[in-house]
Image (cartoon, helix red, strand yellow):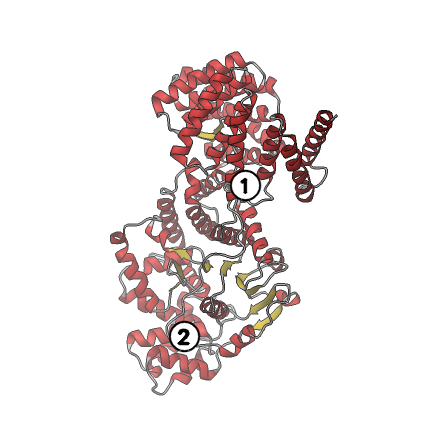
Amino acid sequence: MEATASGQGRINQAGHNQFIFNLPPLPAPARQIVEGDIPQRPRAFQQRGDLLARLHGQVDGRGAAVIDAVTGTPGVGKSLLAASYAWACQRAGWPVIAWITAETEDQIVTGLAALARRLEVVVAGEDAFASAVRARDWLAASRQASLLVFDNAAQVESVRRWCPATGAARILITTRNRAFHTLYEAVDVGVFTPGQAVNFLHERTQRTTPGADQVAAELGCLPLAIGQAGAYIHRRRLTYPAYLTLLRDYPLDRYLPDAGDGYPAGTVQATLLSIDQAEQTIPRARALLELLSALSEAGVPRAILYGTTEPDPADTEDIDQLLADLADTSLVSFSDDGTTVLMHRLTSRVLRERATTTAAGGGSRLAEVLDNAIDLLDGFNAHIPDGAATWAARSAVDMLVEQTTSLHILAADLGEPPGSLLSLRASCGSHLRHLADLGRAIPLFQQNLADFEQVLGGDHPDTLASRNKLADAYQAAGNLGRAIPLFQQNLTDAERVLGGDHPDTLTSRGNLASAYREAGDLSRAIPLFQQNLADFEQGLGSDHADTQISRNNLAGAYRAAGDLGPAIRLFQQNLADRERMLGGDHPDTLVSRNNLADAYQAAGDLGRAIRLFQQNLADRERVLSGDHPDTLASRNNLAIAYYAAGDLHQAIRLFQQNLADQERVLGDDHLHILRSRSNLASVYGMAGDLGRAISLFEQLLTDCERILGADHPTSRNVRTNLLAFRQRADLYSD
């Protein structure tokens, strides 16, 4: 367990046997799963029948994933072609359809982890990487038709490692990178034919008067530009020649002197014409368009724009109407489920470049757009809870991380990232840390520390806090070799800059002591904990939360050193204070009760230990539910206490219940399942049921060697126990 102290963040609190569990993989989902932001079918949609026929014509069921790389120039409709295929798969009833943004590997991991949650194959508390692996493996094992789209992929290797190697999944990759052709069959996407472009204009504008062919030719038959032009002509009730005149007369050099980037002639002008018309006729359009252009090009969830994942519909009416008006201009669109706002990457880039080159009074407005986007995300972040409660908000965390990463990239193009953005990214890292998603948290904290050092210097309090967060993440990942030097550096700097009595200095000292304790260096840990507790009591008082944490940590160090008398007294004081101040159901109170019970058990006072473990289990079942990881941990701890007291009947009952719950919410091959089966087998043996114990250990050893390998510590332990119980059975049979 952990708690937040002032300034630099975490101070460790001891927990005991906190296990984590997941839901089992299903052979097939009970209902169709559509995951990700598949684009909606746009107005006056022009079917690309020839290209779709190529996709439909690929052969399924060859025992390996069928992969097509859909490539082409920006704006030709790669994503819309893939979306067309996804719509067809939905209509055909394919059980799983997943749309993964693939510009970065982090986006791929996040998208696959979200799919794993929909498939119900995740382990509660595991990081996104592990969940993503589970989703990939589910697809590789499935024999039912599924679709996995990697949209706007950038790096071949980043996509290749996440493609299921077997199974019936069809995989589409949309990309501008033709290096994908070296591995995957290509479906090259070009511009509209002249006939397709003219038909699209006729459908979108509801005009069949002369001139559509000239507009199409001016725009190079590029689907994106044709869509912009059709929407503009329809809204303004223009003729095709009138639009063509506006297009050719648009002063592009005034706004975007460096625009182009390989797009056909007229594309940028068409986009800017649509932007100008929207901003002139739709109130507040400019602010929202520029805001969207600064956020993720993969899409912006409506929840971000609302500022909360649970908005009051009455509060969203205005923004929903504004989005609908902008969608009518073809400047934005929506995901298939309507929850995400999409803006084409060219439109985003045009808006950003215009903000860079045009501003009232001269200079760039893009910094102001960036600040507005940071403020928006800060408001959304305020609705994400800290600590254990973050688990229930993991989808919101994914949204925030995605959007904040986009702002960080944009800020790098402008120069130094502002301090407000660095603080927001620090919050993102903390949320990932609370989710135990260290695979994403550590790289984020590493970059964040480098940014703080560059922008604020090594001695700034925010830099010290950032270094502490990184060290904490290293410690949580078991990398004490990296964690301890950072904690040592932070303590030295804090004492020099802030003084020995400053709250942040005390936090730094406590964190270093906790790292020493975890490394088994109690001779260094205990004096630091003792010093901290004295300083906290003197500076903050006995009842302050940081004082209680410090007292808990010192007690835990005494417990680890076998000095149980002082440990029990401190744990007793902490439990009494927390029950008085926080109530019996508060998470910190439950931790204190658990730690005191553990100390009683270590001291041989099993009567007191069992009563406290019983109370904790009852409270967690009532407050958290019977399947919560902390509840399962409490049940495990109580079973161990019963076992220590010789009450094997109660121990077996609880171990059986825990194992049944784990098997229901975990895959059979999970390490925690293997350990629970070992515990239960051991208690069977100690209760004299040697036949059941040996049978369970034999099957368990086979599974451990298959899953973990013969030399894994768990495999060796099971083998030793099996041998011991066989020897005991032989003695009884003689």
- Residue 45, label in figure: 2
**Could you tell me if residue 119 is visible in this image?**
yes
Q: Residue at x 46, y 51 (%)?
A: 402
The image quadrant where one finds the C terminus is top right
Q: Relative to residue 734, is residue 448 drawn left or right?
A: left
Q: Which residue is mark 1?
A: 438
Graded by Cα atoms within 10 Å as few (under 14), some (14 to 19) or many (20 or more), the crowding at tag 1 reads many
Picture layout, residue 2 above or below residue 119: above
Report the front residue among 390 and 626: 626
| Amino acid type at image mark 1 | Leu
What is the x, y in percent for residue 306? 33, 52
Graded by Cα atoms within 10 Å as few (under 14), some (14 to 19) or many (20 or more), the crowding at tag 2 reads some
Q: Residue at x 60, y 44 (%)?
A: 669
N-terminal-most mark, 1 or 2: 2
State the residue lying farthest toward the right: 734
- Residue 578, label in figure: none
Q: Gap between marks 1 and 2, in whole Å?
A: 43 Å
Report the front residue among 56 and 357: 56
